Amino acid sequence: MQESLSLERIPLFATLSDSQRQRIQSQLERESYRAGEDIFVQGAPAEGMLLLLSGQALLFQSNEDGSQTPLATVSAGRGLNQEALFADARQSATMRAAEPVTLLKLTRTRLAQLLREDPDIGAALGMPSAEPAKASINPQFAEQREDEEILLQTHRHWWAFARIAWLPLALMPGIWLGARALGAQAPALLLAALALALPGLALLYLYLEWRNDLVIVTDQRIIRINRTILAMYRQVTQVGLDSVHEVNYELPPYDPFARVFRYGAVIVKTAGAQGNLELPLMPSPARFQSLIMDNQQYFENRKAQRHHRLVRAEMQRMMSAEPTNEAMPAAGQDADGPPRPLSGSNGFLSTRIEMSNGDIVYRKHISVWAQHTALPLLVILASLAALILTFTLVAPDLRVITFPVAMVALLAGSLACYWLDWDWRNDVYIISDDTITLVRKRPFFLENLRDQILVERIDNVESVTSGLFAALLKYGDVRMSLVGADEPKLFVKVPRPREIQQEISRRQHNKSLRRARFDAMQQRKILGEFMGDSADSPAQTPPADAPPVAADNGGVRAVNNPDRNRPPRLPRKIIAAQRQAPQPGASLRSQPRPQRLRPSAKNSPET
């Protein structure tokens, strides 16, 4: 079978023009599967239409008893899942490669983007007024970025639930036998009801605990959500793909079930030991490892292509004499004087203050202020009451004792309240575009500690909420693991720690984008200076016996600069990178995209 497929043979695209079919052809992704590998599994979300180029695949359904029912054999030239291009759907069967298979995939996301760019294609497909549906947001991952795609969302292996579910099941017959042994009817009925209710509630709780733990892998980062219901504990950890240095997996050495059910521990290592992420009892750990490493390579290729596009855009501005905005201040930055709080965000007990330069200042939760100032405020109220009683009910000869005591208590309570309020008000965490600053001050210059962290040196960001009061009042801790640091940096008892975690993640993401633009503008300067010097100097012709230089049309290579704030010094390196760059029409579609990891049907407790 040819390694290409004409869309004219597909009934769905038969009414399109040649140019429209070419645009759809450019959106197709090529994938290859080995014999015996699952192309998709029953119950998984259908991403879009598949077109087989070569090979054969088998379609079958998995039954509840574990058996499989063959449905059909799919040969080269066939198309499947056309309905998944226009609506969310799930696979009703499993498709497995019977021999090496090569196919083309058109995802619903890519078609929706194409319909936004060219509405005429939608009209030709019979949907003139159809608007592409916005991708649904995962409620457990509401912080998903607009340019971020979820590749895997999975729980721990079902054996994590099954290995402890036997205990409630074992209690059920014991309670039932106890009910049978009782002669009285009422206690026997009560125990019989408990024999069903108690183990059932225990199984439900264990199942919910298993479902609460979640691992999400996107094309930009890895997120782990760990929750405990009874302890009111919630931990959210995320690691950016650019921080991942190594991914290992290990099967428990003395656990025979790990080989039978294929689960193990996955360890994601970063530059700092504190930022390592451990994921126990993960299904198919080898495939999970491959997904992260392949996705990281795709992430690096995408950064290289973004860098290439920015350099081309800067060169086009230079050739057209357009002004550059490199000297402009960042959005929201106040050029007149020091930054000041925006109106409405600096109340007396504000815990989140937005500054005019875009920085955000966080204080500890209001409950910390209330806990520290409660006793001094009570002393102040008691001393005021004592003063009132002194001049109303106390005899004049006793006022010489009660009045000084009440005044001393009032002054002591006022001083303590001022001290503790000042202490809470000046313990702040400042998040800016480039740095995170932890400030700790004490009155009368007793302590003035200012710890500043570069945003790009953060490996791992983690938010933790633990306890009933923390869950009700919505406060917790934020932990940041740094490259080369032995101890993490902490935001302690801050309000809404998950929002602060996402704010730090957003600043990291924006920092990488700004750094890419800065590098592109600096390379524009170097290229402009080099071209100007070349124009002023006489042209040099190569000697006649010099060997010809072959053009290198390789793919985009990443620019590895040890100092990210300074571009490479030698212009010839940049020219070589431009020579190796793809043509203007090339895009990320030419890069091999990592496959989504689809959990196996047997990694679910329901099957």
Image: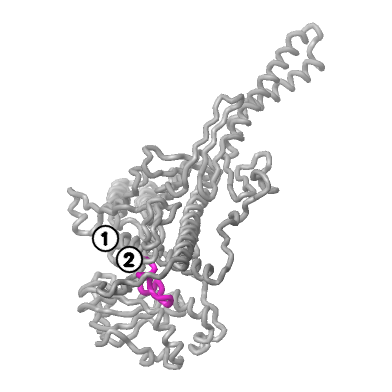
Residue at 58%, 55% in the rendered image: 330
For badge 1, the amino acid type reads: Ser
Task: Check disc 1 and report the residue beneath it.
Answer: 284
Q: Nearer the viewer, residue 176 or 403?
A: 403
Looking at the image, the residue that sits furthest to the top is 397
> Is 570 left, or right, of 504 in this rendering?
left
Is residue 586 covered in magenta?
yes
Q: How many marks?
A: 2
The image shows residue 274 at horizontal and vertical percentages of: 36, 43
Q: Quadrant of the C terminus?
A: bottom left
Helix, strand, or loop for circle 2?
loop
Residues drawn in magenta: 577-590
Name which of mark 1 and mark 2 comes first in the sequence. Answer: 1
Q: Foreground: 118 or 268?
A: 118
- Residue 146 in the image: state x and y as whole percent: 50, 64
| Contact between labelled residues 2 and 1, with CB atoms less than 8 Å apart | yes
Task: Identify the mark at residue 597; answer none if there is no mark.
Answer: 2
522 vs 588, nearest the viewer = 522
Residue 576 sits in quarter: bottom left
